Image (tube, rainbow, N blue to C red):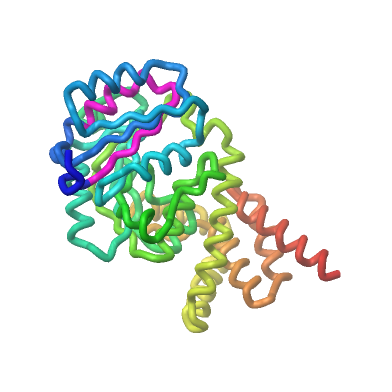
Amino acid sequence: MSQQSTLISAIISTYNSEAFMQGRLENLVDQTIFPQIEIIVINSGSQQKEEEIVKEFQKRYSNIYYISTTQRETIYQAWNRGIKLAKGKYITNANTDDRLHPNALEILTKTMKSNPNVGLVYADQVISDEPNALFNDTKDSAIMKRPRYSRLRLLAGHIVGPQAVWKASLHFQDQIWFDENYEVAGDYDFVCRVAEKYPILHFPQILGSYYLCKDKSNKEYQDIEKTAVETAEIQIRYGKRYITTLDTDKRKRLKNRLLLYLRLPPYFHVALFRLSKTLFPKHYILPRAFVSWMSALLLMNEGDKETAIMLCKSCLKYPRAVTSRILLQELQNSENKQQ
C-alpha cells in the first residue's frame, strides 16, 4: 500500500487481548474504505497469542503492520509508537474490545475533509456488555449520546469518548502527542490540548460500540481513584489556561453565568442537570461540581481566594468532587505559604 493511498491509520495497542483480536481485525477489514486504511498493531509485551492472529491476517492483507515490544508499555506509549510509524492523513485508536459501524471511518474521514479547520471529530456509541458482539448486534444496547462540543463541556468531562478520528498533523506538525506519564486519562489530556488549537466537531450519529464488561473490569474502572485524580489534574490545568484566553468581558460573562447556576438550590441544580441530560443530551446544563470548581478558578484568577475556598468546600459533599478537593488543597497550600 502506497503512502498516497493511505487515508487513515488505525492504531491497535494490545496486551493480553487475544480473545478480542480476531474480531477487532475483522471489524476493521469490513470497513467500507478498508483499502485506504493501514492497521498498526502494537503488541506491548503480551503473554498471549495475538501475534499468531495478526500474522494470519497479514498473509491476506498488505496494509496490516505488527510491532512487538518485550516489555509492557502504557497504552499511550504504545499509541505514540504506532503513530510515529503511521502514513495516514488521519489517525484513530482502535481498542481491541470496541467495534465500529461498517462505514464509520468513511463517514468520519469525509467529515474531516469537509471541515479542514477541525482537528478532531467524534460520534455517538452504544454500550455493549457482550464481548465480541458485532456492531449490528448491539442496536438494542444502551445508547451513549455524546453532547455537542463546547470547551466548557470538555472541561467538565471527557465527552469525546474512545473512537475519535483526528488529523495526523496534530502530531507531526503541532507536536501534540499523548502524555506517557498518564495511565488512564492521557486521551482526555490529548483532546484538551487539541482544543486549545483547533475546533472539535461532534457527528451526531451512532458509529461504534463500546464494550463495558459486566464486572466493570475495564482499565478505567480498575483504579477509579487514579482515573479521578488524573482527570481532575487535567481539568484544573486546562481550566486555568482556558481562563487566560478570555478577555475581560468574556470572563465576566462566564463568571455571571456560573454564579447564576450557583444561586440555584444545590439539590435542585443536581436534579435539573440529570433531567436535562436525559431530555436534552446534546445540550444539557453544566453539572454542579464543575460549576463550583470552575467558578473557584475564576475567583482565584481575580485574587479572591477566600470565596474560591468556600466554593470548593461546599462541593465536597457531592459525588465526583475530586477536582474541587484537589483545587481546595492547592488554594489552602497557597494561603499557608502567604501566612
Quarter of the image where the C terminus is located:
bottom right
Residue lying at the far right of the rendered structure: 339
Q: In this view, does 193 lie above or below 109?
A: below
Q: Position of residue 17 (x, y in %)?
A: 40, 23
Q: Where is residue 224 in the image (x, y as percent from the top left)?
A: 57, 37
* Magenta span of residues: 8-28
* Horizontal side, residue 87 vs residue 267: left or right: left
Q: Quarter of the image holding residue 83?
A: top left
Q: Quarter of the image holding residue 64?
A: top left
Quarter of the image where the N terminus is located:
top left
Residue beneath the point at 21% across and 37% down? 101
Q: Where is residue 52 in the image (x, y as percent from the top left)?
A: 32, 16
Examine the structure image and report whether residue 136 is included in the region drawn in magenta. no
63, 262: nearer the viewer: 63
Residue beneath the point at 50% across and 33% down? 73
* Horizontal side, residue 218 vs residue 41: left or right: right
98, 321: nearer the viewer: 98
